[in-house]
């Protein structure tokens, strides 16, 4: 650790960084205390490493850190966030390797889930003798597995390195995805989809935690929207892949099995990339120099939530259960889960019911991916502005509601108009991801955040399980019961978000009236690395 400190002070990133400014007595005492703590403490604890790097940042002028923070943020955006970034031996990336990161993993995650939707258009139910209700249970099986594994995965994420954990999981996940081509009945599919969901339960919370460790709170919703927008790319690629697989003639196996084999193989290959390159946080990101790690940690110190604490603190679990905002977040998770469960699993059947054959139904799903990309980026960008984070969730619900009303009311003979209404359901990705980011942005204290995030995904999965069962086989092609149920879920989503928004405004004003807004940047920054909850840290403000 001492070598790292010397390297950071020297500046490996820019020639002007070897002139640290003079330090106040408070800063000197804080750094001395940190040095003693590091000698005694766990050197592998991310929060301790983060605290060390933050203390080192106090050697530099704040204006200098602000200037370099822009360069470091661009580097993180280019190397951690994108699907594929090739910066070999350039001034931006000094690692000499190809960095493939979060967006690619999330795109493959969504593609794996959507294989059931695509294969259904090519005779899956007929070949496996599945009834409509059994297909709904197979669609729910993934979410049952996710529900049971959601909280355990969040506890595991608290204790083990995120990057290697996801990479290893992808090997198993890809293998299980390919096994779907080897089953021939309802029971086999239910079991495989159950285990697929249990494995996939780690990805979304892991990326929420990574996003909270790499970006400032004002930046997180837009960055999260970018990696979830890859669901749109996955929808386009998956629909084209399904179209291509369905066009292949004279196969030894049914066409729908080919989809599982291709997507599973891609997932396994991607696992090698992730286990090698995906960092666990700014404290051990290979693409950052030692000085850049200092700057990256200094940036996120303003979040007042630190990095990650390995110890489970049970009083924070209790606090999460007593916080009314937690319950609102969980109810929002259930609402958006109902919506996602219906849209993700029945888009193919809905479009096919408007009068298309299997190949046409696959091809007609591709524009829906574009709707998701545009919706996620547009509302994610809007959410990055002051005062627009929570309103963006409400606004993101409107296109989906309009589409559902259109499906109920437009005459069945206007199939292209009905298809466009179905495409609008993909905009759901925007309020979905903005809800996912709430625990990462608004909850401090790592155990409390883990609890809120874990139970959020439990409720989200419960909603996903319920969603497909609203689509009754006797109501093809409009499914009026399901459409009305989804409209109700949107209304609930808007109601819970509005109450949550009001509570955040009230609590921020209460803290402002108490004068709990300090001026000591060093000490307030260190508070964030002390694993205080948002209730304990009175300098914490909820982002609106």
Image (cartoon, grey):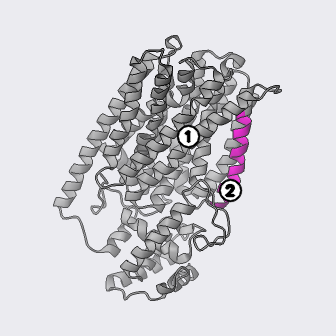
**Dominant secondary structure of the magenta stretch?**
helix
Magenta part of the chain: 259-277
Position above or below: 486 against 49: above
Q: Position of residue 43 (x, y in %)?
A: 55, 71
Indicate left or right for 501 with 150 as reference.
Answer: left
265 inside magenta stretch: yes
> Between 430 and 317, which is closer to the camera in this rendering?
430
Picture quadrant where residue 237 is located:
top right
Indicate left or right for 443 with 4 as reference.
Answer: left
Decide if residue 316 is in sight here. no
Picture quadrant where residue 20 is located:
bottom left
Asked which secondary structure carries label 2, the reply is helix
Position above or below: 421 against 297: above
Q: Position of residue 268 (x, y in %)?
A: 71, 47
Position above or below: 9 against 116: below
Give the label on residue 149, or none: 1
Asked which secondary structure carries label 1, the reply is helix
Q: Residues within 10 Å of mark 1 (few under 14, many from 20)?
A: many
Position above or below: 147 against 59: above
**Mark 2 to mark 1 CA distance (whole Å):** 25 Å
Q: Position of residue 226 (x, y in %)?
A: 49, 50
Give the label on residue 520, or none: none
Residue labelled with disc 2: 273
């Amino acid at each position: 650790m001492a070598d790292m400190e010397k390297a950071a002070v020297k500046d490996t990133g820019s020639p002007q960084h070897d002139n640290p400014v003079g330090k106040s007595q408070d800063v000197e005492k804080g750094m001395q205390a940190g040095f003693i703590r590091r000698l005694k403490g766990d050197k592998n604890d991310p929060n301790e490493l983060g605290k060390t790097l933050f203390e080192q940042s106090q050697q530099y002028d704040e204006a200098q850190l602000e200037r370099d923070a822009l360069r470091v943020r661009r580097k993180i955006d280019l190397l951690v966030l994108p699907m594929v970034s090739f910066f070999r031996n350039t001034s931006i990336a000094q690692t000499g390797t190809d960095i493939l990161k979060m967006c690619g993993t999330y795109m493959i995650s969504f593609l794996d889930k959507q294989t059931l939707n695509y294969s259904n258009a090519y005779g899956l139910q007929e070949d496996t003798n599945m009834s409509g209700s059994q297909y709904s249970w197979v669609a729910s099986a993934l979410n049952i597995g996710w529900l049971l594994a959601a909280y355990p995965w969040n506890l595991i994420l608290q204790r083990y390195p995120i990057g290697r954990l996801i990479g290893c999981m992808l090997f198993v996940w890809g293998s299980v995805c390919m096994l779907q081509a080897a089953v021939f009945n309802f029971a086999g599919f239910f079991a495989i989809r159950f285990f697929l969901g249990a494995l996939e339960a780690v990805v979304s919370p892991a990326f929420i935690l990574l996003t909270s460790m790499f970006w400032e709170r004002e930046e997180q919703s837009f960055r999260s929207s970018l990696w979830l927008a890859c669901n749109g790319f996955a929808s386009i690629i998956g629909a084209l892949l399904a179209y291509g697989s369905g066009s292949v003639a004279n196969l030894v196996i049914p066409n729908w099995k080919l989809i599982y084999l291709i997507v599973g193989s891609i997932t396994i290959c991607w696992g090698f990339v992730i286990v090698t390159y995906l960092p666990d946080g700014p404290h051990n990101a290979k693409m950052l120099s030692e000085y850049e790690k200092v700057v990256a940690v200094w940036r996120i110190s303003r979040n007042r939530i630190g990095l990650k604490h390995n110890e489970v603190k049970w009083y924070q679990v209790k606090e999460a259960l007593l916080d009314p905002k937690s319950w609102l977040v969980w109810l929002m998770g259930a609402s958006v889960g109902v919506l996602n469960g219906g849209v993700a699993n029945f888009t193919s059947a809905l479009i096919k019911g408007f009068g298309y054959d299997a190949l046409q139904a696959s091809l007609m799903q591709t524009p829906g991916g574009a709707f998701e990309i545009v919706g996620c980026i547009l509302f994610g960008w809007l959410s990055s502005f002051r005062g627009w984070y929570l309103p963006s969730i409400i606004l993101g619900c409107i296109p989906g509601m309009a589409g559902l009303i259109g499906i109920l009311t437009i005459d069945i003979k206007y199939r292209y108009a009905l298809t466009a209404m179905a495409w609008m359901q993909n905009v759901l990705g925007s309020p979905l991801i903005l809800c996912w980011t709430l625990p990462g942005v608004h909850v401090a204290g790592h155990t409390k955040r883990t609890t809120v995030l874990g139970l959020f995904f439990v409720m989200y999965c419960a909603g996903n399980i319920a969603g497909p069962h609203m689509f009754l086989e006797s109501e093809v092609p409009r499914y009026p019961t399901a459409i009305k149920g989804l409209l109700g879920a949107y209304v609930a989503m808007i109601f819970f978000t509005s109450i949550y928004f009001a509570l955040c405004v009230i609590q921020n004003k209460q803290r402002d009236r108490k004068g709990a807004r300090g001026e000591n940047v060093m000490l307030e920054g260190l508070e964030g690395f002390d694993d205080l909850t948002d209730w304990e840290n009175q300098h914490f403000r909820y982002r609106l």
